[in-house]
Image (cartoon, helix red, strand yellow):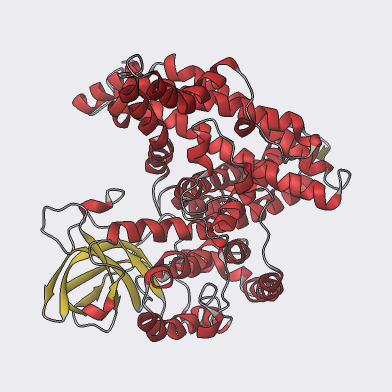
Amino acid sequence: MVDKTNVSFMRSLCLGEIEEEIIIPFPEISEHEKETLRTVTSSIESLLKSHESEFAAWDEAGELPAAVVDELKEFGMFSFIIPEASGGMGFGSMAYSRALQEIAKHDASVAVTVGAHSSIGMRGLLLFGTQEQQDRYFSKLATGEMIAAFCLTEPGSGSDAASIKTRAVLDGDHFVLNGEKIWITNGGIADFFTVFAKTGEPDERRHLSAFIVTRDMPGVRIGKHEEKMGIRASSTTTVSFENVRVPIANLLGEEGKGFKIAMNILNSGRTGLGGGSVGGMKRLIHLATQQANSRIQFGKPIAEFGLIKKKVGQMIVDCYAAESVVTMVGGLTDQKYEDYAIEAAISKVFASEALWTTADEALQIAGGNGFMKEYPYERAMRDSRINRIFEGTNDILRLFIALTAMNDVGRQLKELSAGLEGVFNDPIKGFGVLSDYALRRATIATGIRREKNRFSKLHPLLKNQAAVFEDATRDLAGATDRVLRKHGRKIIERQLATKRLADIMIDLFVLACVLSRVNSAITAQGDKKTAREIEIATAFASQVRRRVRVNIDQIDDNADEEIKGLADYAFTVEKYVWDVL
């Protein structure tokens, strides 16, 4: 039985161990949720299809019409994750992600408006709210009477959330809140704000607390609508607080635990952004295949050209992989695993980048039409760009993925180093030190297969793809060990090496999710009906094998110092100096 309180698939993988019980079988949405979800997706299709001709106008105007927001409320779009007892649909993470996917097939701005409410805006109330707080707000949030927003980012604080300046000072039975938040999604239409502020001394970086703040509190100020590159019809504003008196009863979770609360909210809500990315990809595949079939060049549809087939085929592989990893993370959440932050970050990075690549290739297939505002491609590309930035930039998340996953390896290396000091004086002690981590390392180095570094639950038809994963797992464990031995504590400064490890981890977890999904499909439907899915697994495994090999090779053989040296020179002169004149 897997211990769901402290086991992580990726942390174990860095030690060369494949905890297949965590990912096999592939998670499924419950029958109860499926029944509700079918009704919801049908309603979404009906509602948004009727507005399809208006999407470009909303983008141009830079806002959703108030009447459309009211329709979203009436259709229950703000109630997805709120418990049924409080008037919501009670969706788990997988069902919620699938609902967001359906919305994103139609319009990204609508998906972001709905997603920001449930994924992050009011999720803190769901995860950390007291019964009294939930009773006070859930019903209003379910109906959309109150729309929610998440207030963390500040002018001088983005990924470094601990550096925020907003402060909340206790005064009697209230906290007095002062500060400003920027780029707040739903800021212009929200009445419920999850706000993060320092409650300790000004120089204490991590003494953050979370608060429920409502628009009607005196001193809450909403800024003007921000003009954005994409998702233009969603509301984005500043939100400022001037001597706002927030009752102690509105403290969310424990005082001083705000950083952990913020990270838990973001991790728990990542399936919303992931689902939106998958929905966007499915729409783009539909548009691209229609375009390729109808566009005639040199006497035949461009769908018959090999380069076009390669683009569309890769879109299919990437979409299936993204859907697999997003669903898996939702499954981990629904199954009450507690340590899935690395896996959640991987799902966000992979899905958002897969959507960006798909948008770029769909526009390329459309040719000149793709560049024209008359067609949906350029808007899809603008809309998709933000996903690699908000809810944690992909650059920072890569560092988080690698450094967090390597933590156990670093700890065991430290213990091993300390233990070796007494190996010769105390052979029994030495054997105990060497019998765990060192044994794993030895088997990795020699290629010996142990029970924990191979799959045993996958169908024989996936033997070759599983071998790719197993070999790459040993490569990852060896590379992690080598990098940590070489850099030690300074690894946090070696961002390019860390990024390569992160990219390997991302590829491996996504491949594991694809294998699990195809395995379940074969078990349920047989090999003939899943032939195309097996092709997807084969293609993706082949691509992962090549990418992992390149990243492993470049850990020691690279031009990192030359590249960084050029950057340092550019920072000094602040221009490009090699003009041909």
Front one among 288 and 257? 257
The C terminus, quarter of image: top left
Residue ID at (20%, 25%)? 573
Relative placement, left or right, of 259 versus 321 is left
Relative placement, left or right, of 377 versus 149 is right
Query: Where is 121 relative to 244, above or below?
Result: above
Percent position of residue 350, x then y: 53, 44
Residue ID at (57%, 40%)? 509
Percent position of residue 61, x then y: 45, 68
Q: Is residue 315 among what the camera can see?
A: no
Front one among 515 and 372? 515
Instruction: Find residue 300 and report its image quarter.
Output: top right
Q: Is residue 161 among what the camera can see?
A: yes
Residue ID at (48%, 77%)? 65
Percent position of residue 511, x then y: 63, 38
Front one among 131 and 228? 131
Query: Where is 465 relative to 388, above or below?
Result: above
